[in-house]
């Protein structure tokens, strides 16, 4: 399935602009982006619930812009799950089969298979869907989509209303089902974590455009711009300017920065990004770190095996993450911290 | 701070009776129901078994009024009223469902405008509106006159007919169907209908399997309201029908006033109440069932 130059306008508002995107068969593709970045609109166009203002949607080379949702081999798991509240679990799961006029006996059998695939006991078959818990409903929605037997399955942030632990479990299960069935899954989320765990490829969306497409590793290590890098987790961003002598400086911090690589000729000013895990607290005898700052600790967060310090230097706040160890500095102490140039990223303005 | 404001009540203070907040809130309605509903209802029931023409509720009970109703062809007006009520309800369903869908689909100011247009006629008294229609539809009225003037071909008198009565009833009771149906449709999330389509349902399927069952409580309540009030309809047949048929409400009125036969009027009323009550019972049982199966 492929999008070519697709635009979608709601009135004057562009929800999706100039979108070129192709999914490969059998991949797990995740679209991430902040709310309002056009993810849902994009997926609704793919599923056939909206039609693009310009551009084409192709399925194996065939233009399917005008083909309605009920004639596309795609299926969507909605954010609201959109279960049929007046039906039982079985009624919900069998619905797509009923629409395809599958005989009753076969329907029941297939529904049972789908329930099993979604890790729901078959005894749930006769339960009204309204008596199911949040996680169970999630599985019903998944089973229903699987019963449709689509070539591509879309997920519109279905896990956003689920508590953390269950979400983790379901993320893994969805990933497993994708592996087992070999279907193409296109997943929408605003959570980087979710995207990282599940995807083969990630597309980062910003204001209706794709900022970057790549494997989770690529997106994490080589973000194309500041937006992507900041979206991919908490970062330290330091505004920097090129001074007259050709060096990178932040005057407020009194900091001269060694950039990660040679500076581009046209570079004037920009943002230096350093991930918290690439920052470290310096020991007293450590003096060879090129980029170094002094700050006061005013908060610390325990992250399991790691610990994150929140430091203040002048008016800037920095996050430094390091392994948990004894004899660590406490709040209020002044510490030196720094990073090696290669572990920072520089984005021009 | 003035500490005397805080009054603590000793726990074992003698209280003769306690009423919960709920019971207290329901009390005014309860009083109203007892004196305004159950009381008159009991009186009507009592009068309906009194001898013909009696004005005392305490005579020897008899069923002669009910026998009269059957023997003196009152069932004809019953038939008309029930038929008109059913027909009106059916037409209202056909008119209001698409209208409600449209209002639901238009968001914001367009929906408000549509709603306003529907509600606006309610600000004018029903009888005045019906008289307006008489002036519009009658021979030499606005419609007939305009047509004759413009095309030399008039519509003649459209009043004094059963269709005119049905038209009047549909017109007057439209809001009573529209708003419950609108509420019913509000119970149909757009996502759910989208999902049905996405799962391969065609429009008809989606309508039958998803939209209709989910909107059913609203549809039932609307139909019930319309059926019950059109069963007691009175002005429409009086103004637009001008006696072409007699509805049961007119029979009851004339029994009480012109005929001075309270027991007969009461017996007729009891029968109307039974018909309406049966309809309410059937519909409400259906709605409760729906709740148990669908929502919690």
Image: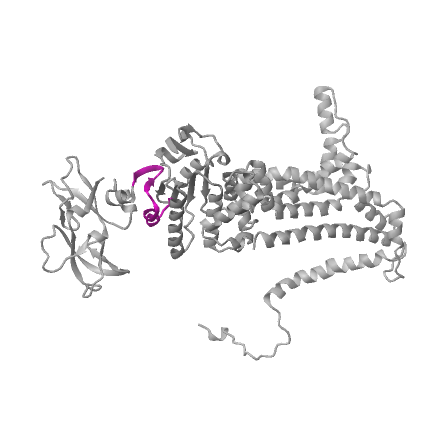
Q: Residue at x 69, y 40 (%)?
A: B90
Vertical order, A184 against B56 (above or below): above
Specify whether residue A208 is painted magenta: yes
Give the x, y percent position of residue B216. Answer: 62, 46
Quarter of the figure that contains the N terminus of chain A: top left
Vertical order, B93 against B52 (above or below): above
Please name whichever residue, A278 or B163, is drawn nearer the observer in this view of the structure: A278
Quarter of the figure that contains the C terminus of chain A: top left
Q: Is residue B111 visible?
A: no
Please name whichever residue, A43 or A282, is drawn nearer the observer in this view of the structure: A43
Looking at the image, what colour scheme do you see?
one colour
Give the x, y percent position of residue B128. Answer: 72, 40
Give the x, y percent position of residue B71. Answer: 90, 47
Q: How many labels, in total?
A: 0
Please name whichever residue, A174 or B137, is drawn nearer the observer in this view of the structure: A174
Q: Is residue B144 left or right of residue A171?
A: right
Q: Which residues are magenta?
A: A188-214
Q: Residue at x 47, y 75 (%)?
A: B3
Q: Residue at x 38, y 48 (%)?
A: A176
Vertical order, B61 against B162 (above or below): below
Q: Is residue B158 visible?
A: yes
Specify whether residue B18 is painted magenta: no
Judged from this view, the residue extending furthest toward the top is B152
Quarter of the rendering containing residue A284: bottom left
Q: Residue at x 55, y 78 (%)?
A: B11
Q: Is residue A263 left or right of residue A180?
A: left
Give the x, y percent position of residue B94. Answer: 65, 38
């Amino acid at each position: 399935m492929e999008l070519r130059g697709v635009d979608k306008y709601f009135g004057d508002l562009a929800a999706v602009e100039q979108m070129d995107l192709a999914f490969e068969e059998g991949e797990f593709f995740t679209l991430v982006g902040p709310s309002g970045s056009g993810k849902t609109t994009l997926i609704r166009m793919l599923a056939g619930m909206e039609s693009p203002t310009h551009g084409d949607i192709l399925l194996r080379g065939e233009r399917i812009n005008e083909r309605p949702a009920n004639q596309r081999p795609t299926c969507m798991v909605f954010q609201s799950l959109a279960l049929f509240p007046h039906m039982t679990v079985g009624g919900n799961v069998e619905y797509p089969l009923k629409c395809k006029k599958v005989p009753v006996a076969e329907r029941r059998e297939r529904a049972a298979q789908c329930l099993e695939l979604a890790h729901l006991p078959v005894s749930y078959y006769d339960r009204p869907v309204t008596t199911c818990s949040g996680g169970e409903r999630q599985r019903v929605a998944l089973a229903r989509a699987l019963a449709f037997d689509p070539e591509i399955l879309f997920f519109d942030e279905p896990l956003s209303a689920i508590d953390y632990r269950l979400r983790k479990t379901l993320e893994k299960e969805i990933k497993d089902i994708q592996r087992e069935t070999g279907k193409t899954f296109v997943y929408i989320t605003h959570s980087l974590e979710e995207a990282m765990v599940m995807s083969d490829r990630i597309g980062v969306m910003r204001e209706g455009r794709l900022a970057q497409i790549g494997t989770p590793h690529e997106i994490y290590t080589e973000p194309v711009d500041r937006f992507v890098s900041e979206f991919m987790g908490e970062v330290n961003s330091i505004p920097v300017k090129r001074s007259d002598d050709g060096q990178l400086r932040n005057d407020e911090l009194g900091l001269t920065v060694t950039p990660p690589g040679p500076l581009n000729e046209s570079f004037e000013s920009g943002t230096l990004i350093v991930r918290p895990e690439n920052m470290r607290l310096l020991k007293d005898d450590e003096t060879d770190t090129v980029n170094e700052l002094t700050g006061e600790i005013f908060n610390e967060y325990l992250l399991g095996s790691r610990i994150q310090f929140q430091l203040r230097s002048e008016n800037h706040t920095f996050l430094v993450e390091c392994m948990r160890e004894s004899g660590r500095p406490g709040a209020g102490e002044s510490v030196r911290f720094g990073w090696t140039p290669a572990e920072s990223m520089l984005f021009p303005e | 701070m003035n500490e005397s404001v805080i009054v603590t009540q000793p726990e074992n203070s003698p209280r003769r009776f306690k009423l919960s907040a709920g019971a207290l809130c329901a009390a005014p309605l309860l009083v109203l129901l007892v004196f305004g509903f159950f009381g008159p209802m009991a009186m009507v029931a009592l009068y309906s078994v009194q001898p013909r023409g009696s004005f005392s509720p305490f005579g020897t009970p008899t069923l002669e009024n009910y026998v009269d109703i059957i023997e003196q062809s009152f069932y004809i007006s019953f038939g008309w009223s029930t038929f008109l009520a059913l027909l009106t309800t059916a037409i209202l369903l056909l008119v209001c469902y698409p209208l409600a869908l449209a209002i639901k689909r238009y968001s914001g100011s367009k929906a408000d405008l549509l709603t306003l247009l529907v509600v606006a006629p309610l600000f004018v008294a029903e009888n005045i509106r019906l008289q307006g229609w008489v002036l519009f539809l009658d021979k030499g009225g606005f419609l007939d006159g305009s047509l004759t003037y413009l095309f030399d071909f008039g519509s003649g008198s459209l009043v004094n007919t059963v269709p005119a009565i049905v038209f009047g009833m549909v017109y007057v009771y439209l809001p009573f169907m529209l708003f419950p149906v609108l509420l019913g449709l509000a119970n149909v999330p757009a996502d759910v209908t989208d999902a049905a389509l996405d799962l391969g349902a065609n429009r008809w399927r989606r309508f039958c399997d998803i939209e209709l069952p989910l909107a059913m409580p609203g549809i039932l309540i609307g139909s019930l309201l319309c059926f019950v009030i059109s069963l007691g309809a009175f002005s429409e047949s009086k103004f637009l029908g001008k006696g072409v048929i007699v509805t049961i409400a007119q029979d009851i009125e004339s029994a009480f006033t012109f005929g001075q036969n309270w027991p007969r009027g009461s017996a007729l009323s009891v029968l109307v109440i039974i018909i309406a009550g049966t309809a309410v019972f059937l519909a409400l049982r259906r709605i409760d069932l729906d709740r148990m199966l669908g929502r919690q």
